[in-house]
Amino acid sequence: MAVATVAARFGLPCVVYMGQTDIERQSPNVFRMRLLGAEVRPVISGTATLKDAMNEALRDWVANVEDTFYIIGTVAGPHPYPAMVRDFQSIIGREVREQMMAAEGRLPDTLVACIGGGSNAMGLFYPFLDDTPVSIYGVEAAGRGLDVPNGHCASLNGGRPGVLHGNRTYLLQDDDGQILDGHSISAGLDYPGIGPEHSWLRDTGRVTYVAATDREALDAFQICTRLEGIIPALEPSHALAYVAKLAPSLPPSNLLVMNMCGRGDKDIFAVAGHLGMEI
């Protein structure tokens, strides 16, 4: 959406590769992109999700590098994209830091964000990495369960190091190094890898990486909507699900910040289908 908007503003052609599965479950965003003049090209290979769309976008880029600029919205892929996206997204964490100091006079105690490729999470986490008293949690997509083969997209909780899309990171893969399909109810978390900096933060122990299932995310989606009047995207619904587990164990004085990184209007048709409701 952001790329299509900027391309429309400056009169640039814009091609968006998107898995056919994601086109169907995020139809409102697809309609908006097409209204803005972008060409949305369906990708039907593999599971027809984010991994496969990235494959096709990278193939297009290397074949037309003279007149094409490749844009990815997450902290994965070849250098310098993980660093570029992290730096752009870090406005999230910088604003949290400033606003918390203004409101409370101190830093937050706990940060929580969902993780697919990991851009929104890195944007929140990065300005606080040197503040060791701040506890940080990244929430992966446990899908149908971490013990279900190809049933999740939690590469940090169920993967091992490998190379995909130009970066070495934790991946869901078989014994021969072939990438597994994985699964998540959320299009933005349906990726069998993770940004390489998250892999480093996992190995160093600076960030704790946990996971939430499809069912837990759906429950959190509904609770947030009914109690707060805020319809969250399915991606941050995973983070909300973990907050519901974590918060009761924290003292009342604990300042917890969760990154509500997307709105749910793009997911309402998919959610309705999972809940057996008609729109």
Image: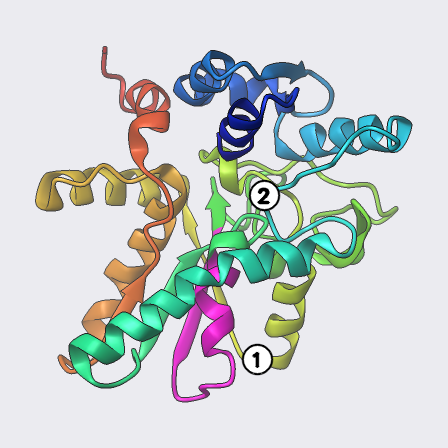
- Crowdedness of circle 1 by 10 Å Cα count: few (<14), some, many (20+)? few
Which residues lie in the magenta part?
121-140
| Res. 19 in view | yes
Q: Quadrant of residue 7?
A: top right
Question: Which type of secondary structure does the marked residue at label 1 adopt?
Answer: loop
| Mark drawn on residue 41 | none
Task: Give the distance between the C-alpha atoms of the residues marked 1 and 2, in whole angstroms.
Answer: 25 Å
Q: Position of residue 8 (x, y in %)?
A: 53, 22
Nearer-the-camera pick, 140 or 17:
17
Residue assigned mark 1: 205
**Which amino acid, mark 2?**
Gly
Extreme-front residue of the structure: 10
Give the left or right position of residue 124, taking residue 148 as reference. left
Mark 1 or 2, closer to the camera: 2
Q: How has the structure been colored for display?
A: rainbow
Residue toward you, 232 or 81: 81
Residue displayed at 20% across by 37% down: 222
Q: Nearer the viewer, residue 84 or 158?
A: 84
Q: Quick check: 113 above or below 18?
A: below
